[in-house]
């Protein structure tokens, strides 16, 4: 409870970076993310490990953005990814990246973390929404036949 370890700090920093890159209204790409990362990381007093992890998350999301957005769209039946609030979209993208491409992190951990981050940064309905979407993503990514 209330643990604010390097992984949570990294997720929160990654959220701010992706959110900022997303809000710039242009495509979220490597350069934009690196620019955002430098300005955001400057505002956070991040330990080295958290900083490295945050950049890893950001670049992973950018690298796999199409797959990630497809997974989110598939899991959130009635929502187009561009209609989601930017904070939710960024929280979902980070967690979906972890679920799809980092199988060593247990799905429950990824989902719990995303819900906590959503609770801190998004609207009051966000945690339940994020939980529901990621639940489906996790089932598809890890429950079914892996590709």
Image (cartoon, grey):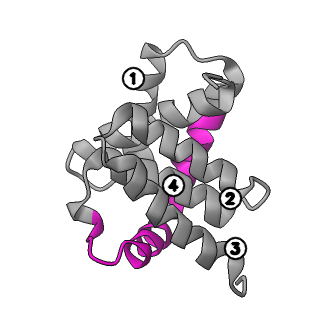
Determine the secondary structure under disc 1.
helix
Dot 3 or dot 2: first in sequence order is 2
Q: Which of marks 2 and 1 is in front?
A: 2
Instruction: Kindly identify which residue carries mark 4.
Output: 61
Overall secondary structure of the magenta section: helix
Q: What stretch is highlighted in magenta?
A: 53-81
Whether residues under marks 3 and 2 lie with C-beta atoms below 8 angstroms apart, the answer is yes
Quarter of the rendering occupied by the N terminus: top right
Determine the secondary structure under disc 2.
helix
Callout 4: few (<14), some (14-19), or many (20+) C-alpha neighbours within 10 Å? many
Instruction: Kindly identify which residue carries mark 3.
Output: 142
Q: Does the magenta stretch include residue 80?
A: yes
User: Residue 35, can we see it?
Assistant: no
Q: In this view, does 65 lie to the left or right of 3?
A: left
Tell me, for residue 39, which label it has, or none.
Answer: 1
Q: Residue furthest bottom?
A: 145
Callout 2: few (<14), some (14-19), or many (20+) C-alpha neighbours within 10 Å? many
């Amino acid at each position: 409870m209330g643990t604010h370890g390097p992984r949570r700090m990294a997720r929160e920093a990654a959220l701010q970076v992706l959110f900022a890159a997303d809000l710039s209204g242009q495509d979220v790409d490597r350069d934009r993310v690196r620019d955002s990362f430098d300005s955001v990381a400057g505002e956070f007093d991040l330990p080295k490990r958290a900083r490295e992890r945050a950049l890893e998350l950001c670049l992973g999301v950018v690298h796999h953005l199409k797959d990630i957005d497809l997974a989110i769209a598939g899991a959130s039946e009635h929502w187009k990814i561009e209609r989601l609030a930017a904070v939710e979209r960024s929280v979902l993208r980070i967690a979906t990246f972890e679920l799809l491409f980092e199988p060593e992190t247990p799905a429950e951990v990824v989902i719990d973390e995303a819900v906590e981050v959503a609770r801190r940064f998004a609207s009051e309905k966000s945690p339940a929404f994020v939980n529901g979407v990621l639940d489906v993503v996790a089932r598809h990514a890890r429950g079914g036949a892996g590709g």
